[in-house]
Structures are given as C-alpha cells and as structure tokens.
Image (spheres, helix red, strand yellow):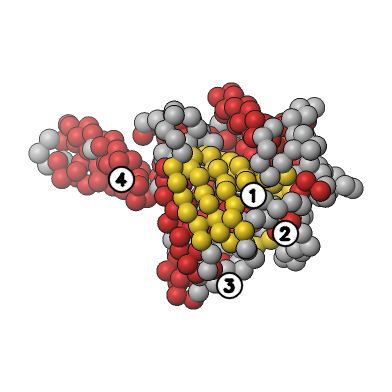
Amino acid sequence: MSECHHRQVHTRRVFYIPGYDPIHPRRYRELYRKEGAAQAEISDYEIALSPKVADGGPYGWHVTGQMEGQETHSDVEVLVWSDIVRDSMEQGVLSTYGQLLRTAWTYIGSGALWRLMQLRKGPVIAALYPVVFLLVQLLLALLVAWGISKGLAMVLPEWTVVFGLIVVLPILQWFQKHDDKFFAYYLMHDYAYSASTKGANPPELEARMGEFADRIAEALQSECDEVLVVGHSSGAHLAVSVLADLIRDGRVPEAGPALGFLSLGQVVPMVSFLPKAERLRADLAFLCQRAELAWIDVTAPGDGCAFALCDPVAVSGVAPEEGKRWPLVFSAAFTKTLSEKRWAELRWRFFRLHFQYLCAFDRPGDYDYFRITAGPKTLAERYEGRKASGSRIEKPVNKFTSVAS
C-alpha cells in the first residue's frame, strides 16, 4: 500500500452512488443527519452537518466530525441517476407485464438464475418476488372479472365476458398506484433495467457514468486527503466501472489523495452473471488487482437483498490466478452489531435492512459508516490488517466469463 493511503485525514471528498432509486437525493442527506446523530450519541463522538451553497451544482452536504482526537471535514456529494431510474419506471401496466416475461426469460433462459441460487437464496427470492406478486395481482383481477361475469350471466349473457374483463385493467392499475406498499412494480423495473440489455450498460447510463468519472477525477486533483467512493446496492457495480475507467485513463495521480472504494450491500452478480455483461466483468477483473485504491466490500447475511459475503470478483469467475488484491470482504454482522431488541424490530423489514449499512448500530463493531466518512483515517488505514470473513463465498459459479476486449 502506498504512503498516500496512510495519512491523517483533515479533509475528504465523499461520492455516494445510490442503487436503483427514483427518490430525490435529499433522502440520503436526511438519513445521514438522523443516523449520524444517533451513532454519535451511541459511540460518544460528535458529528455535524451543514448545507452546501445552493449554487445549482451537485447535490450534497458538509460534515464535520470530532472523533478519535481530531476534527475532520468531509464534503459528501450524491452522484445522481434517479432521473434515469424514473424514466425507466414510466411503464404502464401492460408494459410491465411484458417486462416480467422478458426479464424472467433472460435470467431463466440464460441459466443465470440457477447459478445465482447457488450463491444466496435471499436476493434470488427478492428477484422472484415481483414476478410472483405481479402474477398474483393478475390472478386476483381475473377472479374478480370471473365473479362479475357469473353475476351478470343471468341478466346480460351476451355481454358477460366483456363486462367481466373491463374490470381487470382498473384493478391492476390500483395495485400499481399503491405499489409503495407492495414494491412489486418497483422491483420489476429494477431487475428489468439490467436484464433488458442482458447486462450491458444502456447508453444513457454509460453517459452518466462518464460524468461521475469526471466529478471524481476533479476531486483527485484537489488538495483533500482522501477521495472516498461509496457504492450502495446497484450503485456498487456502477462504481466498479467508473473507478476502473479512471485508473485505465491515468486519471488517478500517484501523489494525489488516497482513493478508497466502499461497496455496501452489493448485488453485482445480478448483472455480472448476464451474458452481455462483458464490460462489468472486465472492470471487476481489472480493479481487483490495482494498488491505486483500497476496496472494502461490506454486506451482511441478515440483508436478504444483497449477495452477502460473496466476493463479487471471484463468484463472477474473473479473479486472476495471481495478483488479486481486492476486495476485502467482511460482514457488518447485523445479529451482533444490533441489539436483540433492534434486530427483532428490523429483521422482517427487508428493504430497511438493505439500508442498514448507512445507519446507526447500537452495538457497533469495526464497521461504522460515519467513522469511515467523517473520521480521521483513510479507508485503507482503518482496515489495514483486517482479515476477510472466513465464511465468504469465492466459488466461481458464473456461466459467462467473457470480458470486454
């Protein structure tokens, strides 16, 4: 590890890449404010947020941390692609059911689904949930239509089927309108987004990732002590490609800030196991060997939406025979770092648990999102000597291992 990775951090630039999320990035600021205050009280340190100047620039906030005997200043910026997510979600009911058929065929027909099941059942169940629930919604609508048809059979027999079927679409539209309770449409659009191109990046996303790279490259030319990239959920595989591009293009200066990459709750295999994900697989194989950065991957078996403790490089079948440095894979260990009471409150709230990496722990271990983003140590120094989890999964089970040339 180069000396630039081991320096006391007075100033830091943090770039947060969200997962597939249509919500305005202010939700991440409010989450950071609320949970940071809670963790500070638990862990006996100080953390304070202040807004960025409203100049029309990128969305973010300032953080001042008083911990481990030092004051540290961090600028946090959300790299936004929620507009792309919203555009991809603008699908009618019938279009969504078409997505369902195409997405199911992509994962089942390619053999990816079976291989994903050999890793973790949780995220596969999460992927199957929208398929099953949308089919249940359709069945319920058809049952109501059938009931209406039977009721009208004695009065208007010639119009029975027509009147019955008329109610199907409004019922399905009602379910879509209330998807904030069911998440079936949301998850369907999520998995369909990558499946529609069989793992290749859509052009609009590729262009946005280029903008992300430019933002991070600018920070790497600044006088801050660390540039930290955080990729959560689907944002983790975007970060892999963005960082690989930066290093390949020579945009990471040797004498610049320390570069850290923290992947949280990653779902990399959902994309890297698809046949046309050559770009992502090449980036995984490249990034895992680089000395320019430190890459820490944190998941937890309690998070049913993530591929917990699955080394994203190894399971994707692209780990080199020699020279693999990253990622360092370990668990946030929710059952240990959350009290029994807190765990009981959260264990069945699957989507909330998927965001726990960004939240406070009432029995914190060596993973603390706020020490990482607002404390005085670089990511590399904080986890120097940390052993990878002994229960991590490294078996290469991916059928598709071709990479971009």
User: Mark number for residue 383?
Assistant: 2
Q: How many marks?
A: 4
Q: CA distance from mark 4 to mark 1?
A: 46 Å
Q: Earlier in the sequence, mark 2 or mark 3?
A: 3
Looking at the picture, how far across and down is residue 44, in whole percent?
A: 52, 69
Residue 266 falls left or right of residue 284: left
* 2 and 4 marks in contact (CB < 8 Å): no
User: Mark number for residue 10?
Assistant: 1
- What type is the residue that disc 3 sits on? Lys
Q: CA distance from mark 3 to mark 1?
A: 31 Å
User: Mark number for residue 336?
Assistant: 3
Q: Earlier in the sequence, mark 2 or mark 1?
A: 1
What residue is drawn where x is 50% and y is 32%?
58
* Residue situated in front as seen by the camera: 224 or 278: 224
Q: Secondary structure at mark 3?
A: helix
- What type is the residue that disc 4 sits on? His
Q: Secondary structure at mark 2?
A: loop
Q: Secondary structure at mark 1?
A: loop
Check the picture and name the quadrant holding the C terminus: top right
Q: Earlier in the sequence, mark 2 or mark 4?
A: 4
What residue is drawn where x is 46% and y is 71%?
342
Dot 1: few (<14), some (14–19), or many (≥20) neighbours within 10 Å?
Answer: some
Q: CA distance from mark 3 to mark 4?
A: 35 Å
Query: Which residue bears the numbered disc 4?
Result: 178
Q: CA distance from mark 2 to mark 4?
A: 43 Å
Q: Earlier in the sequence, mark 3 or mark 1?
A: 1
